[in-house]
Image: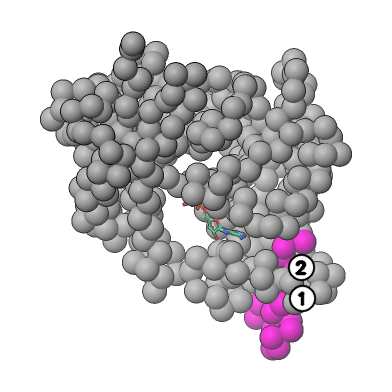
């Protein structure tokens, strides 16, 4: 019987140091044997955002024991690992370099192939870790660093249908939270404050709502929140602003997802319509229920991977590594860290908004 591949995945592109060991069963269904994630929230809290130099230092301090823990928890031995997959981009170059160099050195030490992984490809394939999924599917990634709609057509086959032209959605949540006096990263608190507020109180802008296809923009909304936050005097007004922001985001995502549905359908001959949502913002309960309702209205099956696979993790990096390993798509040890590395290399000219993406 052929031995099933055992892959070590390493992730260090931003503020999570992570390592994971995965394999697959006889039917080719992936199995996560370990998935270790160490977040740096405490390191960056007092600065109100990720400080690259501190993030890199923290990755260096943790990477060896995180990898060791992932191997120990997997119940397998180092000698059994068949390949090492590390995130090579996009992300902060000083952070990427840590996991990338570690992965290359580790692969060399155990004399096994090295695989450089695009972090976005990891997110795009992450639903395959726990759901039986056929290509193509429509994927919405809404995290602290990225916001995009992708048609996932196969390994290495991605068509970006829309992306943010400025801030990521998680960033907009975190900035709004900061302006409301909540510690970084406060995005997850918005929906809690919003429950006590009047969502009709403030009329907030919806940038590129009626143009730009399913591209997104949140910078104008943030500026508006900044202006209003300066006028806020009472707790109730804070709740009202959180509620108005939450409602505005839901309206933007509702409309843009509908546009993404029709673009996805135009580009693919679909047997089944599948919509997958991942990234930290996918934890937002109201966004979730709005998107589930939208899927029902449009005959889509909606899939939300579990939270530990939605945010940054190394199991998704190992997942891409597993697929590439099976196709013998290995990389040389001189593969660079790529701070910018779009999945779909075609730049899109956003007509009407006049923006080169
Ligand atoms: O994917 P993720 O865990 O990590 C990175 O992007 O690195 O996403 C984190 C983002 C943060 O901006 C956080 O504020 C946001 O996801 N987030 C939320 C919620 N939970 C996390 N935003 C809105 N509502 C939530 N419940
Ligand atoms: Zn990510």
Q: Report, in whole angstroms, how far the alpha carbon at label 1 lies from the one at label 2.
A: 8 Å
Residue drawn at the location 46% of the way across and 28% of the way down: 30
Residue at the left extreme, as displayed: 109
- Give percent across and percent down for residue 178: 55, 72
Residue 345 belongs to the span the image colors magenta:
no
- Give percent across and percent down for residue 70: 29, 44
Quadrant showing the C terminus: top right
Is 295 in front, or is 198?
A: 295
218 to the left or right of 129? right
Is 151 in front, or is 37?
A: 37
Marks 1 and 2 close (CB-CB < 8 Å): yes
Q: In which quarter of the image is residue 237?
A: bottom right
On the image, numbered disc 2 is attached to which residue? 244
255 to the left or right of 161? right
Residue at the front extreme, as displayed: 1
Residue 197 vertical placement versus 121 (above, below): below
Residue 111 vertical placement versus 281 (above, below): above
On the image, numbered disc 1 is attached to which residue? 197
Range drawn in magenta: 227-247
Residue drawn at the location 42% of the way across and 45% of the way down: 313
Residue 233 belongs to the span the image colors magenta:
yes
Residue at the top extreme, as displayed: 1
Q: Residues within 10 Å of mark 1 (few under 14, many from 20)?
A: many
Prevailing SS of the magenta stretch: helix
- Give percent across and percent down for residue 174: 56, 64
Residue 83 vertical placement versus 175 (above, below): above
Residue 166 in view (yes/no)? no
Residue drawn at the location 75% of the way across and 40% of the way down: 257
């Amino acid at each position: 019987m052929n031995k099933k591949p055992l892959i070590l995945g390493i992730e260090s592109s931003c503020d999570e140091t992570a390592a994971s060991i995965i394999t697959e069963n006889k039917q080719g269904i992936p199995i996560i044997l370990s998935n270790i994630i160490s977040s740096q929230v405490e390191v960056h809290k007092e600065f109100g955002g990720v400080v690259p130099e501190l993030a890199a230092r923290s990755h260096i301090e943790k990477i060896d024991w995180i990898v060791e823990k992932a191997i120990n928890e997997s119940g397998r031995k180092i000698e059994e690992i068949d390949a090492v997959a590390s995130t090579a981009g996009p992300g902060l170059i000083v952070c990427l370099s840590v996991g990338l160099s570690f992965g290359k050195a580790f692969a060399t030490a155990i004399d096994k192939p090295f695989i450089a992984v695009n972090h976005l490809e990891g997110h795009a394939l992450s639903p395959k870790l726990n759901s039986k999924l056929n290509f193509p599917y429509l994927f919405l990634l809404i995290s602290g660093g990225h916001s995009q709609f992708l048609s996932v057509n196969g390994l290495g086959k991605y068509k970006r249908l829309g992306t943010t032209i400025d801030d990521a959605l998680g960033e907009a949540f975190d900035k709004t939270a900061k302006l409301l006096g909540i510690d970084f990263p406060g995005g997850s608190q918005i929906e809690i404050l919003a429950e006590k507020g009047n969502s009709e109180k403030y009329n907030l802008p919806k940038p590129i709502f009626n143009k730009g296809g399913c591209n997104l923009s949140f910078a104008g909304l943030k500026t508006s929140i900044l202006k209003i936050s300066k006028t806020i005097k009472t707790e109730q007004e804070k709740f009202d602003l959180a509620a108005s922001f939450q409602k505005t985001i839901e309206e933007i995502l509702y409309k843009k997802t509908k546009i993404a549905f029709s673009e996805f359908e135009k580009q693919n001959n679909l047997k089944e319509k599948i919509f997958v949502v991942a990234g930290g913002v996918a934890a937002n309960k109201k966004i979730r229920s709005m998107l589930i309702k939208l899927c029902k209205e449009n005959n889509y099956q909606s899939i939300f991977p579990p939270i530990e696979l939605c945010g940054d993790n190394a199991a998704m990096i190992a997942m891409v590594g597993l697929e590439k390993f099976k196709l013998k798509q290995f990389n040389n040890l001189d593969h660079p860290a790529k701070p910018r590395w779009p999945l779909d290399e075609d730049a899109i000219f956003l007509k009407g908004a006049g923006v080169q993406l």
